[in-house]
């Protein structure tokens, strides 16, 4: 059974840090790019970051570039999103998604076929 499980969300103060994890099971993890997306209340889902299957390609939304870092450990079937210098506007439910694609991209969520249930990130001011 294909499954993605996010963890690591929570409540943090402005300027704080969190590390999100996305753990996968039930499929050949090494062939899949992983994307992180987020959705705040009343807003559309937006792409945050992604990493290619081998880890050689990463992309970031301009709003998080320089503050967030994505990485993957294929031995643990896990992708991490290190989030530093968090701002209230980063508050959202964060989802990880897996897609069988070359490289990675965060402009089209539909290329990712498998999604986790999401983890809430709340940044207080």
Image (cartoon, rainbow, N blue to C red):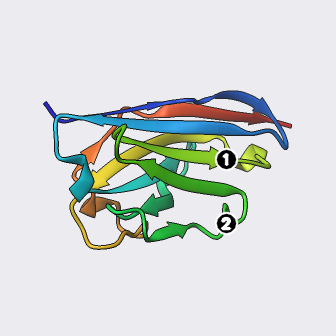
Provide residue 25's location: percent of width, then percent of height.
24, 33
Q: Which residue is mark 2?
A: 65
Q: Quadrant of the C terminus?
A: top right
Q: Which residue is mark 1?
A: 83
Which of the marked residues, 2 or 1, is nearer the chain's N terminus?
2
Q: Residue at x 66, y 61 (%)?
A: 64
Question: Looking at the rendering, which quadrant does residue 95 occupy?
Answer: top left
Q: Is residue 26 left or right of residue 110?
A: left
Q: Residue at x 76, y 44 (%)?
A: 88
Q: Looking at the image, which is closer to me, 54 or 4?
A: 54
Q: Quadrant of the N terminus?
A: top left
Q: Is residue 78 left or right of residue 12?
A: left
Q: How far apart are the two marked residues, 2 and 1, measured between alpha carbons?
A: 10 Å
Q: Residue at x 61, y 56 (%)?
A: 69
Please, what secondary structure does the residue beneath circle 1 have? strand
Provide residue 5's location: percent of width, then percent of height.
37, 31
Please, what secondary structure does the residue beneath circle 2 have? loop
Q: Residue at x 55, y 38 (%)?
A: 20
The vertical placement of 84 against 8, above or below, is below
């Amino acid at each position: 059974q294909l499954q993605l499980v996010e963890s690591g969300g929570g409540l943090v103060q402005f300027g704080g840090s969190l590390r999100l994890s996305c753990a996968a099971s039930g499929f050949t993890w090494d062939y899949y790019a992983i994307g992180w997306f987020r959705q705040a209340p009343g807003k559309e889902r937006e792409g945050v970051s992604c990493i290619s299957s081998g880890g050689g390609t990463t992309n970031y939304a301009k709003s998080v570039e320089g503050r967030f870092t994505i990485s993957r450990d294929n031995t643990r079937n896990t992708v991490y999103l290190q989030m530093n210098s968090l701002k209230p506007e980063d508050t959202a439910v964060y989802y990880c998604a897996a897609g069988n694609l070359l490289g990675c991209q965060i402009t089209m969520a539909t290329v990712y076929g498998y999604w986790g249930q999401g983890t809430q990130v709340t940044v207080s001011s």
